[in-house]
Image (cartoon, grey):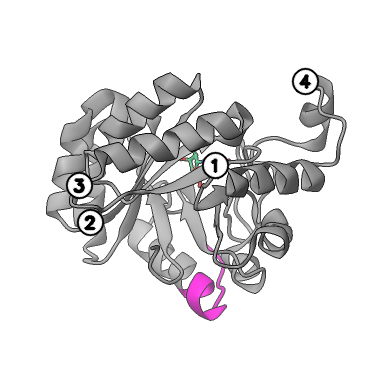
Amino acid sequence: MLATKPMFIALDFPSGEEALSFLDQLAIEEVAVKVGMELFYKEGPSIIEQLKQRNYKIFLDLKLHDIPNTVERAMKNLASLGVDVVNVHAAGGKRMIEAAQKGLQEGAINGQKPLLLAVTQLTSTDDEMLSEQLLIQEEMEQVVKHYAYNAKQAGADGVVCSVWESRLVHDICGTDFYTVTPGIRMENQHNQDQVRVATPTVANEQGVSAIVVGRGITKAEDPVRAYHQFEGAWNNGNETTIS
Ligand SMILES: O=c1ccn([C@@H]2O[C@H](COP(=O)(O)O)[C@@H](O)[C@H]2O)c(=O)[nH]1
């Protein structure tokens, strides 16, 4: 089960050394972190081991998308790392998501299985890309809702979506089905490559289960201050601007 309202910090750093020194600078004991492809492909399981030694909650964001057999076997290995959350692309379909859960059960340590999320549509995808490049003619909200419903039926524990689709997902899948939302920015921050963005205050209002914040904190002039600003806005609706 996810802690109430976690804020995952995306550790998108080129090396474990940089990620760990950032966490030292933050100096906060109870932190939830997200390890993505950049860091994991550089450091492998050793970075997970080091983060676990610090007792952080870990979301291993590798977004698996392959045939069911391959995903099942890969998930068995990921579960054995003892991480808290993993994910797949919902576009892989229900059989793949079922296989992912099976793999996680097979690899679980002491019955502790990581939560499985399915990415509905990346928060960097806009309506035009959906229709012109992916040839999906339904509205974004419809697509996210449909993929979330498939994921739920296939046994996933939640989805990755934008803040703007979280309510729809909860309406159709129930409020205990997690909505984990990247694309979080303060009012005056640049969107960079993200499209479906929202502030932590809006995420709070929309009832999302968890937020993911990367560059808004890690690339801020004062990351410690930025962390507290995001955290305050997320937990108390206490929004200030980031300088
Ligand atoms: O739809 C998705 C799925 C995953 N992500 C990941 O979240 C962080 C966001 O980083 P920011 O710097 O806050 O933009 C990043 O690691 C992505 O890989 C996502 O953004 N959207």
Asked whether 188 falls inside the magenta stretch, the response is no
Picture coordinates of residue 101, whole percent (x, y): 42, 40
Q: Residue at x 81, y 22 (%)?
A: 135
Q: Residue under circle 4?
A: 133
Look at label 1 and name its amino acid: Ala
Q: Residue under circle 2?
A: 25
Q: Residue at x 22, y 28 (%)?
A: 43
Asked whether 234 falls inside the magenta stretch, the response is yes
Picture coordinates of residue 207, whole percent (x, y): 62, 70
Quadrant for the N terminus in the image: bottom left
Q: CA distance from mark 1 to mark 4?
A: 21 Å
Confirm or reject: label 3 Cβ below 8 Å from ligand 1.
Answer: no
Q: Nearer the viewer, residue 59 or 171?
A: 171
Look at label 4 and name its amino acid: Gln
Left or right: residue 172 versus residue 114 is right
Q: Residue at x 59, y 49 (%)?
A: 152
Q: CA distance from mark 3 to mark 1?
A: 22 Å
Q: Which residues are magenta?
A: 232-243
**Which label's residue is closer to the chain start, 1 or 4?**
1
Q: Which of the 4 image quadrants contains residue 227?
A: bottom left
Mark 1 or mark 4, whichever is nearer to me: 1
**Rendered image: mark on residue 4:** none
**Which label's residue is closer to the chain start, 1 or 2?**
2
Q: Identify the element where label 2 is drawn.
A: helix
**Rendered image: mark on residue 109:** 3
Q: Which of the 4 image quadrants contains residue 167?
A: bottom right
Q: Identify the element where label 4 is drawn.
A: helix
Q: Residues within 10 Å of mark 1 (few under 14, many from 20)?
A: many
